[in-house]
Image: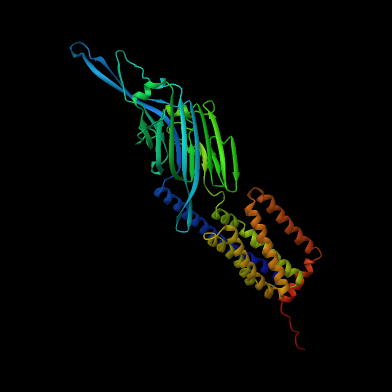
Amino acid sequence: MKFPLLGKTLAVTGVLIALTLALQSISAIVSEREGRLHEAERSVADSLASQQSLLGPALLRRCDETWTSEQGEGKERKLVTEKRDFALAATPATLDVSAKAAIETRHRGIFKVNGYGMHAIMKARWADLAALEPTAQHAGGKLHCEAPVMFVAVGDARGIRVATISVGGAALPVLPGTGHASHPRGFHAVIPAAIQAASGVLQAEVALDLVGTADLAFAPVADTTTVALTSDWPHPSFAGRFLPNEREVTATGFSARWQLSALATSAPQELLNGGTVCGLDGASDGKTRCIETFGVAFIDPVSAYVLSDRATKYGLLFIALTFVGVGLVEVLKRLRVHPVQYLLVGSALAVFFLLLVSLTEHIAFAWAYLAASAACTTLLSFYASFVLRGWRAGAVFGAGVAALYGALYLLLQMEQSALVLGSLLLFAVLGAVMVATRRVDWYALMDQLRREASPAVAPLAQ
């Protein structure tokens, strides 16, 4: 070959392209397995209960007004009785919620889904019930109202295990549903007339055992809302419109406390206006302004599939750095490494990422990473000892690969510092290559390669 270095470069470039396609296939496998995890989460939510949002307690009273009006003129004039149905609602002046959530892990095949069970005590106080007193809007109108009900709305009623309501120290029968058009899922209790007439101040206590998956949200519907939440989950993701005023996160769980007033949120007014509940991401149904919420998501901060996907994205850089090391040995030791050998080394590096994602489905990510990297490092050290013609050279090559695996693990664990660490790594590799090849005469090296690749020409016979 007239230009052996160019031919070698093109061959290695072709190997890199083939390995890039292989890494893309592995990345597609990671995405597919992550999709299977989301399917498992939806399956558990469909069978158990989905994300939960807790709204209430609040008071609701259904009323109607009837009146007589004249319609028509002359002989056609007649009296017609008309009716108007409406509902009155009252939010508490103060609401104190004390809740404890325990993680209840569910499984779908090899996939783990975080469910939770929550026990909450809600204490509410209404300074007066004037908001439940109807006012006629038509002359001669007659008003009729049902007994007020106290309701608590949840995101998914299937998650209700136990619910009790006591008003003024008296336990009330709990009935399904809320009677509220915008928040039908939940439970309610009818307020007896004796309790209504006892005092203008109403105090209630609601106890609730609730299960759900992924998220838990609270709506601050009182003039002053205080929520104290504790859990055994050590990786809380606080979300919604308000972060906790106080929080403590340890290796065994967390505790958080929110305190809000109606000056900081429109939730009480939106409830009275019939608004729907916002999700923790602030989303609503788009029809009305939603009731603001806050809470926590019980999800893994960085799942094994996310880490595997991030590792695969570094795969091409990982392989390129290894090829640079092999090429450097070729130049300095005057060894010849065939493109097929480059392909086998790169394939071993690519298989590492496939091993990683498959092992993380069964064991912890750290152990899966250790097992996959140890297997690939051992294989590459053994193979390199023959390619580089020496056990010592193979051991040095394996140590370099192990160092790359260690650097990649640090990049995965330190997401916020990944860019600066990656930049420093590339700078260090570039500096090492420049220092190691600073005395290489590239023209002489190319001439030598050309002479070795060109067959000797026999002299012409005399």
Is residue 58 or residue 334 the one in the foreground?
A: 58
Q: Residue furthest front?
A: 169
Instruction: Specify the color scheme.
Output: rainbow
**Horizontal and vertical percent position of residue 249:** 60, 44
Asked if residue 3 can be seen in this view, the reply is no
Q: Residue at x 80, y 63 (%)?
A: 438
Point 51% across, 26% down: residue: 262
Location of the N terminus by quadrant is bottom right
Q: Is residue 24 left or right of residue 51?
A: right
Which quarter of the rendered picture does the C terminus lie within? bottom right
Q: Is residue 50 above or below residue 289?
A: below
Q: Is residue 445 left or right of residue 220?
A: right
| Residue 257 shows in this picture | yes
Name the spot of residue 143 as percent of width and height, x first: 31, 19
Which residue ends up furthest to the right in the rendered image? 439
Query: Residue most toward the bottom?
Result: 462
Decide if residue 37 is on the left or right side of residue 441.
Answer: left
- Point out residue 449 in the picture as x, y percentages from the top left corner: 74, 72
Residue drawn 30% across and 16% down? 141
Task: Give the number of callouts.
Answer: 0
Depth order, front residue of 226/169 = 169
Instruction: Answer left or right for 389 relative to 14.
Output: right
Name above or below for residue 99 compared with residue 127: below
Q: Is residue 380 above or below residue 288?
A: below
